[in-house]
């Protein structure tokens, strides 16, 4: 983690004093350490040794320009799931031939943009259904182009086997994702016959925040097995993809590192005799989560007396809520929270809550917090700002980017003034 507390108690991210930062930028604000994110990508790429590979960063985790640009500079590609993310990835310098496009609902417009990106289109549209295969073929035919596709297979790995929150398990057979394993042979034949499609890969994504390599490797075996079948049927595959999902330590431990997933799956790839194919992984969270914090200000405390069998309640009410960081409300996720100023002596446990009018706007019980000042919500670099909303009339938070020990860019918290008529188009009657 790039967060440190020095001897004098100052909390720093990437070397920048967060107490000083907060006095200048205000709250709620996300702060990210670009150097640590780049180092994370470098460490992951080392796990491939000299094997052909692509680290396709899952842009959905954090699509901020300085972050995507930093990962592009490390040679990362991108896994995008919308035309908007495609625009961000290309705008940040990721070449189209390092971009894959996943998602069950690609619109015609998004398919066209992917096919027409750069000289030859993006590396691959990862198809999630046979119906989509037909649509991509039609769009490619309409513009007399060829589209490169990969089949994203649904490996039907049991939800329970993945060992993560049900909302982020994607590879079970009730999930809307991926082509059912039994339909893959049909998809192979269709792709083979399609004049405007080149099938170049088979991929999978089994779920997110995996804290063991088991389900990841099991899904990898399914991909490798299908890749062998595809080759036997004449497909000129270029890659096999085993998805993202590498877990991080949110404070409860995570025994496996991102590189462990890569090493484990590479061993299987070799066992299947497929080492000549490029191995794609699609990490989002593991590259960015630990290198971002959400800073908030304590608004006040609130106490409620205890009854015969209820303990006294002590809430710490802060100015960041579920609209800024949705993970606790949506997945019962726990993020550690620490005071920004460490000089305080009056630390105690509080239930930390935000300002949003929902009981789910609750960050849980945390020890060692003070009744005023600022707090840092840790490990908020992934799926924080990208899932933020304006619910309850709240402006989107600020974002601050730190590099070389200093602030290099700031996206101010938006001003709500424009909301009243900003996007309104008056329609004549
Ligand atoms: N590839 C595909 C096809 C995906 O659907 C995802 C994530 C990833 C890669 C990246 O997974 P990661 O390495 O970040 O685990 N909002 C949730 C996570 C949702 C993940 C959705 N798909 C959260 O905050 O935990």
Image (cartoon, grey):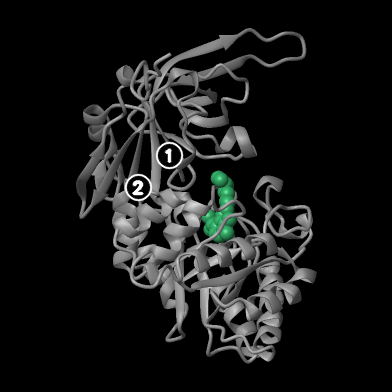
**Front residue of 318 and 235:** 235
Question: Would you say 231 lies left or right of 92 here?
Answer: right
Dot 1, crowdedness within 10 Å: few (<14), some or many (≥20)?
many
Residue that appears at 49% across and 26% down:
321
- Quarter of the image for residue 373 reads top left
Quadrant assignment for the C terminus? top left
Q: Is residue 60 above or below residue 220?
A: above
Instruction: Specify the label residue 64 is tagged with.
Output: 2
Residue 50 in view, yes or no: yes
Q: CA distance from mark 2 to mark 1?
A: 9 Å
Pointer 2 and pointer 1: residues touching (CB < 8 Å)? yes
Label 2: element kind: loop
Q: Which residue is mark 1?
A: 385
Question: Would you say 161 lies left or right of 168 here?
Answer: right
Q: Earlier in the sequence, mark 2 or mark 1?
A: 2
Q: How many marks?
A: 2
Q: Which residue appears farthest toward the front when viewing the image?
A: 429
């Amino acid at each position: 983690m790039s967060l440190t507390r020095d001897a004098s108690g100052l909390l720093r991210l990437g070397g920048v004093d967060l107490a000083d930062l907060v006095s200048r930028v205000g709250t709620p604000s996300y702060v990210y350490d670009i150097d640590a994110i780049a180092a994370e990508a470098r460490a992951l790429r080392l796990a491939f040794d000299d094997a052909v590979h692509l680290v396709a960063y899952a842009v959905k985790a954090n699509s901020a320009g300085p972050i995507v640009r930093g990962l592009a500079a490390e040679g990362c590609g991108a896994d995008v799931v919308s035309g908007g993310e495609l625009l961000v990835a290309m705008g940040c310098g990721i070449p189209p031939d390092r971009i894959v496009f996943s998602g069950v609902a690609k619109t015609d417009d998004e398919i066209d943009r992917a096919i027409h990106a750069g000289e030859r289109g993006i590396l691959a549209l990862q198809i999630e259904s046979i119906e989509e295969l037909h649509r991509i073929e039609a769009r490619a035919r309409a513009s007399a182009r060829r589209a490169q596709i990969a089949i994203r297979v649904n490996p039907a790995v049991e939800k329970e086997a993945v060992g993560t929150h049900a909302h982020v398990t994607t590879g079970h057979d009730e999930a809307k994702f991926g082509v059912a394993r039994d339909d893959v042979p049909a998809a192979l034949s269709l792709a083979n016959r399609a004049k405007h499609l080149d099938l170049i890969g088979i991929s999978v994504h089994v779920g997110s925040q995996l804290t063991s390599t088991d389900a990841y490797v099991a899904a990898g075996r399914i991909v490798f097995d299908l890749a062998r079948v595809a080759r036997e049927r004449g497909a000129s595959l270029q890659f096999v993809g085993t998805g993202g999902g590498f877990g991080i330590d949110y404070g409860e431990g995570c025994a496996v590192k991102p590189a462990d997933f890569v090493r484990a799956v590479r061993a299987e790839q070799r066992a299947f005799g497929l080492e000549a194919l490029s191995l794609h992984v699609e990490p989002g969270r593991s590259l960015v989560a630990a290198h971002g914090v959400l800073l908030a200000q304590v608004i006040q405390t609130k106490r409620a007396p205890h009854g015969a069998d209820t303990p006294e309640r002590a809430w710490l009410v802060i100015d960041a809520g579920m609209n800024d960081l949705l993970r606790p409300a949506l997945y019962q996720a726990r993020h550690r929270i620490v005071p920004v100023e460490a000089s305080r002596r009056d630390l105690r446990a509080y239930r930390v809550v935000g300002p949003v009018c929902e009981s789910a706007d609750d960050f849980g019980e945390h020890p060692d917090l003070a009744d005023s000042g600022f707090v840092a919500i840790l490990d908020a670099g992934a799926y924080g700002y990208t899932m933020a909303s304006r619910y309850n009339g709240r402006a989107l938070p600020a974002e601050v980017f730190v590099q070389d020990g200093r602030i290099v860019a700031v996206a101010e918290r938006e001003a709500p003034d424009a909301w009243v008529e900003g996007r309104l188009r008056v329609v004549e009657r």
